[in-house]
Image (spheres, helix red, strand yellow):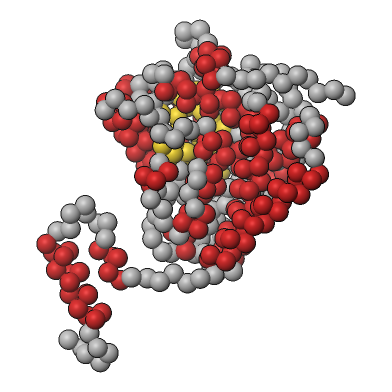
Amino acid sequence: MAAPPVQQSHPDDLVRELAGPPGWDLLPTAEPLQLVGPTGEQVGSQLRLPADDVLLDLHRRMVLGRRFDAQATALTRQGRLAVYPSSRGQEACQVTAATVLRPQDWLFPTYRDSVAVVTRGVDPLETLTQFRGDWHTGFDPYAHRVAPQCTPLATNTLHAVGLAHAARLQGQDTVALVLLGDGATSEGDTAEALTCAGVWRAPVVFLVQNNGYAISVPLAKQTAAPSLAHKGVGHGVPGVLVDGNDAAALHAVLTAAVARAAAGGGPTLVEARTYRMEAHTNADDATRYRSAEEVAAWRDRDPITRLECLLTDRGLLDAPAREALSAEAEQLAALVREGTTQEAEADPLALFDHVYAEPTAQLRAQRQLLAEELAAPAGDDR
């Protein structure tokens, strides 16, 4: 059967499509927006399918991201990493969040968003630095405009709004995209961030990765709202509900949201319904709060398989291309393995770095004292 013709999307068109008539755009659709069904079939939608090269790039980045994630999970089990929160199953959210941003934009990730950080261009080994128990953030946030991965729930929402608002006051063309989970939407910080973003019309995109659980607490015990996207209405922020395992739909929605923010249209709250296939972290036993049947049902909606089926049906992806991509993913995994088997050399004096832009006199004195103790000959107990 011949594949339907591909409709090319353009950000301006998508902005108009998502904006809708006045009063309509605050409310999300009843069902998640979708472009590609669970078995790879193209479905009717108000969105338009991204261009072929974009779809191929999304697929490649998801494959690489999953291999990186699997390697990091294995290193945790081997004791090479102290902890690693896997995002397996959420690759569509991770990859699209990073790829829709322009070079001047900022990404505000959480502890689960390492694949998004790597996709944005941060070195994979630097990304894993904090999970080895080394530096809190192993990369330069300014180099790729990626904020440190946030562990406290929802605090990064306020950081994103503050940065985006300040940038606009300074006349800069900058959009901030902040990642958060469904549990973070129950935090007061998120409500405050949405309020400020709505009032200031700050150029921010809130991407909620709704994977159904706040660690072990199911969504039904967190909210009675029709959807998390509905939470934007009370703050004057448009809400969009999208299939979080459909990379094509997510790319279309987030591209429009970023373009809308950059054009002065204000913030957007996007809820992406997805699923975390692994446990919350290596310290969690997910079998205590969810069934094998539930996990299996979501495995059938895998974001990579879904897009791969579409690309194969369209003649855009064949066996040699898949083999080449698999080899590239293994090279990435090997780089991560080799890099993390080398012990980090800790510098005790680094304890005093980056505490303040200008160290206090007390800190300088303490640093000098420690330097003298480290330089003292062995056995010198001064």
Query: Which residue is most to the top?
Result: 21
Quarter containing the N terminus: top right
Res 10 seen here: yes
If the image is split into quadrants, where does the C terminus sit?
bottom left
Q: Residue at x 40, y 41 (%)?
A: 145
Q: What percent of the width, then of the height, locates residue 125?
A: 50, 58
Q: Is residue 32 visible?
A: no
Q: Position of residue 222 (x, y in %)?
A: 50, 37
Viewer-proximal residue among 240 and 160: 160
- The residue sitting at the right extreme is 1
Write the residue at 72% across / 21% down: 6
Q: Is residue 129 left or right of residue 242?
A: left
Closest to the observer: 79 or 275? 79
Q: Is residue 167 left or right of residue 342?
A: left
Q: Place residue 227 in its image quadrant.
A: top right
Q: Position of residue 71 (x, y in %)?
A: 61, 59
Question: Depth check: 263 or 243 in front?
Answer: 263
283 left or right of 163 in image: right
Count of picture labels: 0
Query: Which residue occupies the extreme left position in the image?
Result: 361
Task: Residue 374: name its quadrant.
Answer: bottom left
Give residue 357's position: percent from left, percent from top: 21, 52
What residue sits 54% from the left and 44% below the top? Answer: 119
- Residue at the limit of the structure toward the bottom, as seen here: 379
Q: Quadrant of residue 351?
A: bottom left
Q: Residue at x 47, y 38 (%)?
A: 179
